[in-house]
Amino acid sequence: MQVSRGVPALAAHPAVLTIGNFDGLHLGHQRLLGLLRQEARTLGLPATVMTFEPHPREFFAPASAPARLASLREKLIGLAEAGIDHAVVVHFDARFAALSAGDFIERVLVRGLATRRLFIGDDFRFGAGRRGDFAMLCEAGDSHRFRVAAMPTVTVDDERVSSSAVRDALADGDMTHAARLLGRPYSIAGRVVRGDRIGRTLGFPTANVLLRHRRVPLAGIFTVSVEGLAGCALPGVASIGRRPTVSDAGRTTLEVHVFDYDADCYGAHLRVNFLDKQRDEEKYPNLELLRAQIARDAERAREWFGIHPL
């Protein structure tokens, strides 16, 4: 997949396009990308996704913006796996936010990306003040020779599939429901970095997965599977949170204990799949009590895998 930073002044070739944040790449996103890919193959044009970094809500209201389901790197990997040919990553800043709806159509859709087909979500708004809507796009399409199609709502058990619904499920610790909305278990990917090795001293060595100052949508102790260490996923238990017993730094960390694995994995890129939430974080008065609780967490995870083998 080709990745471009920013919209060119003049497109090199026409495109079949969709636009959005695509946070989490849930079932609704997947259906939209499937339609995009099918139309692109029919027309012999690249299936193109335009997405934003940072998320517009992070730009307008950083203090109240929702936690991301995926990093930009994870999103791009997911788009490539979905068969997308070209991802255009737009830096969302004051200049881009100030584009009028008309300028967005002319500069981005017509000149910059030479759009021939445009697929959008049914709630898509664009331009300064969010003044652009589906009707305006259809009118512009008639003038500039591109067709517009709105993606209907996708539901699971009568619930609209959305990134917000996935975040709510994760916040509630309902990993099964989150997986239903995503079409797969929720996961976090990242590189293993050196930690303080406290887990090893407690008898439970952990891989510390770098989060890069990312706000995450879940916290607690989880039964997990881990990809990236072997030819198949390996079972384990993970803690994601602020480690109140051993640290007062207030920084969120992801630590994973992989069962029966003790090799050096520094620098490895792992994907941690969150399968079942066991409990919230707790602060213990000493490390011995923490060690005993970790042992119970590990045993509970092993029991879970006894019922749900990988």
Image: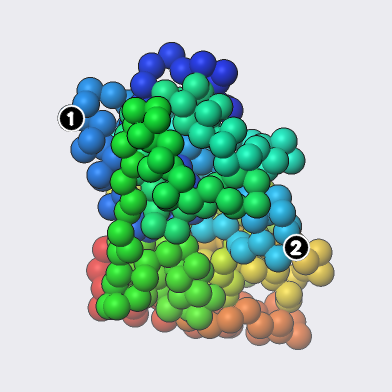
Q: Sequence-wise, which precedes: disc 2 or disc 1?
A: 1
Left or right of 150? Residue 129 is right
Provide the secondary structure element on which disc 1 rests: helix
Decide which of 283, 118 is in the foreground and name it.
118
Q: Which mark is residue 309?
A: none
Compared to residue 98, the image places residue 300 above or below, namely below
Identify the amino acid type marked 1.
Answer: Thr
Q: Which mark is residue 42?
A: 1
Decide which of 246, 100 is in the foreground and name it.
100
Residue drawn at 49 percent across, 22 percent down: 111
Compared to residue 53, the image places residue 294 above or below, namely below
Work out which residue is located at the far left of the displayed protein and give it: 42
Provide the secondary structure element on which disc 2 rests: loop
Rate crowding at label 1 as few (under 14), some (14 to 19) or many (20 or more) other CA atoms within 10 Å.
Answer: few
Q: Residue 63 carries which label?
A: 2
What percent of the width, then of the height, locates residue 107? 55, 27
